Amino acid sequence: MKKHFIKLFMGFLFFVNTGAYAHIVTSNQTLPVLADLHLLRGIGVPIIIQDPQINLGFTYLNPDAQRRLSLLAHRYGKCGGFEVIQDFDPAVTRNVTLRMSYIKERLRRDQVWASGPVSPVQLPFRQEIASAIQTANKEQLTKWVNWLSSFPNRYNKSAEPNNHVVQLKGLIEQMRLRSKRQVMVSMVDHKQTKQKSLKVTLPGTTRSDEIVVLGGHLDSISFDGDRAPGVDDNASGSSNLLEALRVLMSQPAGARTIEIFWYAGEESGLLGSAEIAAEYKKLNKKVVGVLQLDMTLFPGDGPRVIASMTDYTSAWMRSILASLNAHYVKAQIVDDRCGYGCSDHASWYRQGFHTLMPFEASMKKMNSAIHSRNDIITPKLNFDHSLLFTHYAIALAMELSQNTTLVPPNI
């Protein structure tokens, strides 16, 4: 890894502003959040705990501050930017300090693994994966995106936050009628939002308690009116998962279980994924790896050039992506960073799971039309480029569910 990135983990400093803490917790309109430290500074809120070396801060945000943070993240070419801490005890500031310390230690250990003797992961070519990938269909992917973006919005705070979720559930239930493989579909209720997440389970055979997670957020948001078609953010990643599911339903079951999530309320602080990841941690579920797909249609660095986020993701999973890419996809991968809470993988990483976040382009060249009524299909979008991410989802799901010699490092 680059020397400047390794230096990130030298030293450790937390700053606790107890006066600000006492002031903020009195508001019944605020939420406890972990967020990109630069964004918190940019909106001028008191920061209760901060670690500049990993650019992470903890504070409370009222609804106006949440909106201002999202707007600033958008201006900087970022999506999201914060995670609502739903299992936080407001009486114990030390609780957050320990969690941030754990995140920092995870990042350090990932760097150690990346420079160690078992890195990188070397996977053999498998014809069955190559053949499965070839059945992914660009035209079908386009239909999925058009369908999801036809809803006026998919915002978790809208008057009907689950209309699209219910309809997607019905669509998948129709799809599974054509599958010889067992497919289970369910909706997940949440405490912090009325919107539900959608979950599809493809049970494994001999090691069904070990789980491969694929995910993307289904909600959309707009800062310039009620209409939020959210073509790229995130009908694109959601549709990649749909097309991957269509292909996976025609493949033999692997030893491990595959779970696919379409998360609720990502744009309001990773609400759905944070609850799910915390519950999986509480139940000590054996999650092998987590893939997050969020925005895949805009080839800002050029067609077939994708970004792989290196912050708050697993070096082990990034190594697997590189090996799968070399065998089956052959795109150019550039490393980039998106800051804490830029998408749902942060929820899983904070709970100790191994995560991966391939992205449409580097952050500076991502789609600037997101979070607006203009996040629609235009000639600037590229469905061949987006299809690459369906290929990654299929390859990762098949490799991790079938190759039980792949065991995540204990870091």
Image (cartoon, rainbow, N blue to C red):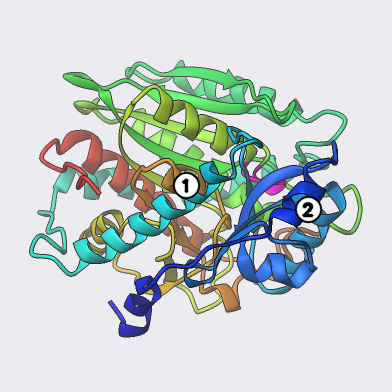
Magenta region, residue range: 266-270
Q: Specify whether 130 is left or right of 354.
A: left
| Residue 327 appearing in the image | yes
Residue shown at the point (90%, 47%) measured from the top left = 226
Count of all numbered marks drawn on residues in the image: 2
* Mark 2 nearby-residue class (10 Å; few <14, some 14–19, many ≥20): many
Residue designated by label 1:
99
Residue 241 % position (x, y): 48, 41
**Label 1 – label 2 distance at C-alpha:** 22 Å
Please, what secondary structure does the residue beneath circle 1 have?
A: helix
- Marker disc for residue 66: 2
Residue shown at the point (49%, 78%) measured from the top left = 302
| In-front residue for pair 88/383 | 88
Is 313 covered by the magenta stretch?
A: no
Please, what secondary structure does the residue beneath circle 2 have?
A: helix
- Marker disc for residue 142: none
* Mark 1 nearby-residue class (10 Å; few <14, some 14–19, many ≥20): few
Snapshot quadrant of residue 161: top right
Residue 308 % position (x, y): 41, 66
Residue shown at the point (35%, 16%) measured from the top left = 182
Residue type beneath disc 1: Arg
Residue type beneath disc 2: Gln
| Residue 239 appearing in the image | no
Residue shown at the point (28%, 60%) measured from the top left = 110
